[in-house]
Amino acid sequence: MNFSLSLDQHRTQCLNGGADCDATCTWSKTLPPKSFEVPSFSVKVFLGGVPWDITEPMLAHELRQFGMVRVERTVSKQPGLPPPKGYAYIIMGCEKQVVALLKSCRFNCGGGSWYFKMSSKTMKAKDVQVIPWMTSDSNWVCSPRQKLDPEKTVFVGGLHGTWSASVLATVMNNLFDGVVFVGIFTDKFKYPIGSARVTFNNKQSFSKAINSRFVTIKINQFAKEVELLPYLQDSPCVVCMVKLGPYFCRESPCFGYFCRSCWQCFHAQGKRASHKHLTRSTKSVLS
């Protein structure tokens, strides 16, 4: 049996750094739904358009025919507020249950999406969108023998939840050229978390991507702005060359890692005083 996936709306999360800025590049194209003969799915599934008054026990009850289901709600960005309504993640017991759920869904050939009828106290037989993830979509590589250079790797944040690694490779290659690897970051259930890393085979393409900073991607009438940042790793401070540099400066001519003391000294005055450092734990403007 063929299962098709398309690109549709989905909540995403990412951890990186950045500042307010308009997109400098735009990529737009209509892609046909993909088809795989023997897909392998994550046991985690996203449900969109869930009835607002449905509770987690009610949601699990609606899906009881497929076995035990655990419901996950995302945490509200504002402390003290309840989790956002209208969507949820479900964790199924095994991949066979995911396939059984998809077989019970109505498939929209035009949009390439699955829909499952779900009822609540106020809504009857509402179409809820079911968004699975094929694990084969997590990575794309130009050649298995290709050596990957972390210094030519960018972090991509704010990704659309159903964009595969091959789709992102096409976008980045069309915009900047030289893409040799794309890896979508996933959680413990192998479900995407909304970010990825992209490796280039030359410094020019890497620099062009980093300098673009923000890119608007339009696929199948849906637009999403993503953020491009250096892929941070454990590196020594470029000034003292002794301590590790947890701070990264993307501004020219700095563009390197700094330890805390060297950052303070090097960025104490002049134009460098306005530079903002990036760390692995800095929140993105797109998160």
Image (tube, rainbow, N blue to C red):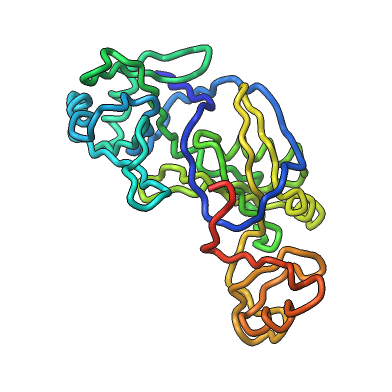
Write the residue at 26% across / 13% down.
124
Image-quadrant location for residue 274: bottom right
Write the residue at 42% across / 49% down.
77
Image-based side of 141 in relation to 11, left or right: right
Image-based side of 224 in relation to 78, left or right: right
Taking the image as drawn, is residue 147 in sight?
no
- Spot occupied by residue 38 in the image (x, y as percentages of width and height): 42, 28
- Spot occupied by residue 34 in the image (x, y as percentages of width and height): 54, 24
Q: Nearer the viewer, residue 92 or 125?
A: 125
Relative to 7, does residue 164 appear above or below in the rendering?
A: below
Q: Nearer the viewer, residue 21 or 175?
A: 21
All told, the count of numbered labels is 0
Relative to 147, does residue 141 appear above or below in the rendering?
A: above
Write the residue at 40% across / 31% down.
132
Q: Residue furthest front?
A: 80
Q: Nearer the viewer, residue 131 or 77?
A: 77
- Spot occupied by residue 247 in the image (x, y as percentages of width and height): 62, 72
- Spot occupied by residue 177 in the image (x, y as percentages of width and height): 77, 43
Q: Nearer the viewer, residue 228 or 92?
A: 228
Image-based side of 55 in relation to 276, left or right: left
Write the residue at 77% across / 78% down.
269
Quarter placement of the N terminus: top left
Relative to 30, does residue 230 appear above or below in the rendering?
A: below
Taking the image as drawn, is residue 116 in sight?
yes
Image-based side of 254 in relation to 55, left or right: right
